Image (spheres, rainbow, N blue to C red):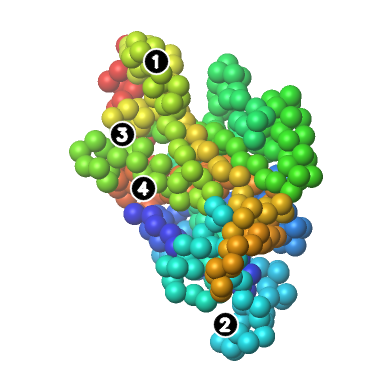
Amino acid sequence: MIRYFTAGESHGPALSAIVEGLPAGIGLKEEDINRELARRQQGYGRGGRMKIETDRAEVLSGVRFGKTIGSPVAMVVRNRDWENWTTTMAQFEDHSDNVRKITIPRPGHADLTGFIKYGFDDIRPVIDRSSARETAARVAAGSLAKAFLRQLGIQVGSYVSSIGPAGQPLAHDRLMELLAGGAEGLAVEADRSEVRMLDHDAERAAIAAIDKAQADGDTLGGIVEIFITGVPPGLGSYVQHDRRLDAALASAIMSIQAIKGVEVGTAFDNARLPGSRVHDELFAGGAEGLTRKTNRSGGIEGSMSNGQPIHLRAAMKPISSLVSPLMSFDLSNLDAVQSRFERSDTCAVPAAGVVAEAVVAPVIANALLEKTGGDHMEEITRRLDDYRDELLRRFRA
């Protein structure tokens, strides 16, 4: 099964990722990885760090002649800003007497609890590892799972439905039109917008809201919509809690920095409606086999994929590093002070969608491998094709 680990600090020499369990024979290009890294860096409202870094991944192992070979893939994303932090983040030389300690935590950040948990006398180690800069390594790792799924007809994409007070979910007909060719088509269309929104009025309102927040020294959060198309029915299981697909997807999305809520389909709206207006009616016997006319369940029933596009919504809180500070205290003497500002974005919601795509891809890939088995692409493709053909024969007239 696919699993990955990341390492590195925001202002260290590099971020790194090791991806284990990828089948052999996945076709890869450098652009498959670097395109995703570039998408993560886009977005109106990003801070100064994105002007410094141009992320590219160096693949160190696990790929030969443009294909995975079944062994772990190791990747490094260099931090160009490291040259300015060689003293502050020195790894072996002790510069603690020459580096100012950070002792004022920011409300809403990992600063205080990380400081307490790991027994530091300086918040800097917490800042550097808890930073969303880490997601560059996760996007690199997730790009490999996305490439694997893509070659099996499964696509992952996202768009931003709201930023602060601006925006709302896309109209159903327009959404279905964009998803007709797969979720990546929707993502390509979203990427044309500085805020990854698909409604021009909402886009203008979001940009204005970001400008106002920036002028006020404030920050904005928002909501990201993630879609996964081409997923066959039957991935995941209801038989044990740790095999439930929706639980695994929610866990992956909640692991993203600043994400505070996850919704499957239109779950919160559904909670206010009677069951007759919530559940997706079933139809069989046509040329397409098993179908549904609605997708209020978000493509998951009984914690398993049901063949519909999987739809997830993620709520990102406003970034906690504010130019206009909130109240805090100094850990060195407990005096009340205003919280400090760490270089940051005004809004990173557009990037959050790209990160969400990356973290859900390994979850779907693992659920698929659990269903099909197989160690190389030819074997997996054959088994998945047989499964899809069997389902079509069973439910088609």
Which disc is residue 366 wearing? 4
Residue where numbered disc 3 is placed: 303
Residue where numbered disc 1 is placed: 273
Task: Tell me which amino acid carries mark 2.
Answer: Gln
As helix, strand or loop, the secondary structure at mark 2 comes to loop
| Residue located 61% across and 25% down the image | 168
Please provide percent x and percent y for residue 72.
Answer: 43, 65
Q: Earlier in the sequence, mark 2 or mark 1?
A: 2
Q: Earlier in the sequence, mark 4 or mark 2?
A: 2
Q: Are marks 2 and 3 in contact (CB under 8 Å)?
A: no
On the rendered image, what quadrant is the N terminus found in?
bottom left
Tell me if residue 177 comes above or below residue 28 in the rendering: above
Q: Nearer the viewer, mark 2 or mark 3?
A: 2
In front: 16, or 283?
A: 16
As helix, strand or loop, the secondary structure at mark 3 comes to loop
Q: Earlier in the sequence, mark 2 or mark 3?
A: 2
Q: Earlier in the sequence, mark 4 or mark 3?
A: 3
In front: 52, or 283?
A: 52
Please provide percent x and percent y for residue 159.
Answer: 60, 34
Which disc is residue 91 wearing? 2
Q: Earlier in the sequence, mark 1 or mark 3?
A: 1
* Quarter of the image where one finds residue 81: bottom right
